[in-house]
Amino acid sequence: MNIGKIYSIPLNKETAYLAGVIVGDGHISNACKSKSDKSKDYRISIEIIERVYLEYIVDSIRAFVKTKSKIKERINNRGNRTKLYYFQFRNKSFHHFLTHDLCIPSGNKCSSVRVPEKIFGSLNLQVSFLAGLFDTDGGI
């Protein structure tokens, strides 16, 4: 069985920001690829209302991982029928960085997510992570 190589993703201001974005408006898969293929699905997705902002996030992700995935749109069926834009990509190294290095839970995270301990290593990491979280889930 070929499990593939995991490449190290550095913890820096950019990846701390991306981690904050994913905690805010993202999802880390905790599933298998399919009913017949029980191997782990390394899917990470982000769903945001503003396409221009998501394009910025996708460019940032592509600085660390290679992906051919594209931004897609769907209609939000929860009341106001606004357009939502989402980006899904699969990358074992980035998935490992989020779930193992930063200990961000995969699957339903609403009651179990915390600021990762490694983020407290420097003030710059804290500011970057909180900026990503606030840019997606923050408000006045």
Image: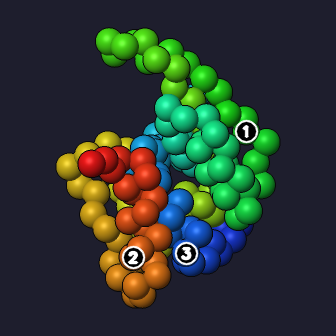
Category of crowding for the residue at label 3, using alpha-carbon neighbours closer than 10 angstroms: few (below 14), some (14–19), many (at least 20): some
> What residue does disc 3 label?
13
Label disc, if present, on residue 126 of the rendered structure: 2
Horizontal side of 84 relative to 2 (left or right) equals left
List x then y, in percent, for residue 41: 56, 43
Mark 1: give few (<14), some (14-19) or many (20+) Cα within 10 Å: few
Residue drawn at (43%, 52%), measured in percent from left and top? Answer: 135
Between disc 3 and disc 2, whose residue precedes?
Answer: 3
Is the residue 5 above or below the residue 25 in the image?
Answer: below
Tag shown at residue 69: 1
First-in-chain label (1 vs 3): 3
Residue visible at 60% across and 42% down in the picture: 54
How far apart are the two marked residues, 3 and 2, measured between alpha carbons? 9 Å
Q: Position of residue 129 (x, y in %)?
A: 43, 67
Residue 47 visible (yes or no): no
For badge 1, the amino acid type reads: Ser
Q: Residue furthest front?
A: 140
Residue furthest to the left: 111
The residue that appears at 53% across and 60% down in the rendered structure is: 18
Does residue 124 sit above or below 43 in this rendering? below
Q: Is residue 80 left or right of residue 94?
A: left
